[in-house]
Amino acid sequence: MEVIVFRIDAGSDVPIYRQLVQQVRRDVMLGRLRPGDQLPSVKEVVAALSVNPNTVVKAFSELEHQGMVVRRQGVGTFVAAAPPLASLAMAPKLLAPLARWVDRARQDGLSAEQIRMLLDVALDEPAAGEDDRDAAGGAA
């Protein structure tokens, strides 16, 4: 079982509890967390990140509300038997080239925010890149 290490970006506009929720959702989707895996306790997360316990409780409550985790009184918080997000079987194959692209973008001086914006554009407007290729190749 892989140990879950939460990370927070203090400079982000995203609230800390939301960052924690996103990390658990991502790890479930990538298969890093599987049904039945235990999340760190609220105390462990608070100690590791130096955040308010209410922040962690809020994140875990949100995850429980979404059906991602189940809490067992006195035992802990576990990934649900059937989380709403299925694991992506092809994720490891896609992650390596994506990580290389992110590294290139960083080397070119792009910030994390700029990289996210580019990804958002690619997700929201997939035909934008195709239009550019058609225009470049079709005008001779």
Image: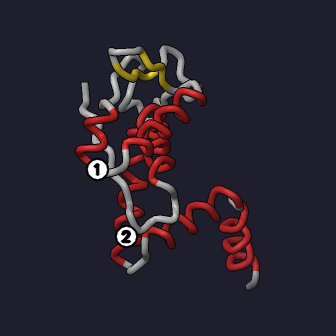
Report x, y in % for residue 49: 28, 50
Report x, y in % for residue 1: 25, 24
Report x, y in % for residue 128: 71, 67
Give me the residue at 30% from left, 43% from top. 46
Q: Say what amino acid the circle numbered 2 marks.
A: Arg
Which quadrant would residue 42 be assigned to in this image? top left
- Residue at the farthest bottom position: 140
* Mark 2 nearby-residue class (10 Å; few <14, some 14–19, many ≥20): few
Which quadrant would residue 75 be assigned to in this image? top left
* Mark 1 nearby-residue class (10 Å; few <14, some 14–19, many ≥20): few
Give me the residue at 39% from left, 23% from top. 77
Residue 49's tag is: 1
Residue 67's tag is: none
Which quadrant would residue 130 be assigned to in this image? bottom right
Q: The C terminus is located in which quarter? A: bottom right
Helix or strand or loop: what does disc 2 sit on? Answer: helix
Give me the residue at 48% from left, 41% from top. 21
**Seen in the image, is 134 located left or right of residue 83?**
right
Q: Nearer the viewer, residue 135 or 103?
A: 103
Helix or strand or loop: what does disc 1 sit on? Answer: helix
**Residue holding disc 2:** 104
**Seen in the image, is 9 located left or right of residue 123?**
left
* Cβ–Cβ under 8 Å for marks 1 and 2: no
Q: Earlier in the sequence, mark 1 or mark 2?
A: 1
Q: Say what amino acid the circle numbered 1 marks.
A: Leu
How is the protein colored in the picture?
Answer: secondary structure
Q: Nearer the viewer, residue 5 or 92?
A: 5
Give me the residue at 38% from left, 60% from top. 9
Relative to 120, residue 18 above or below: above
Q: How many marks?
A: 2
Relative to 86, residue 118 above or below: below
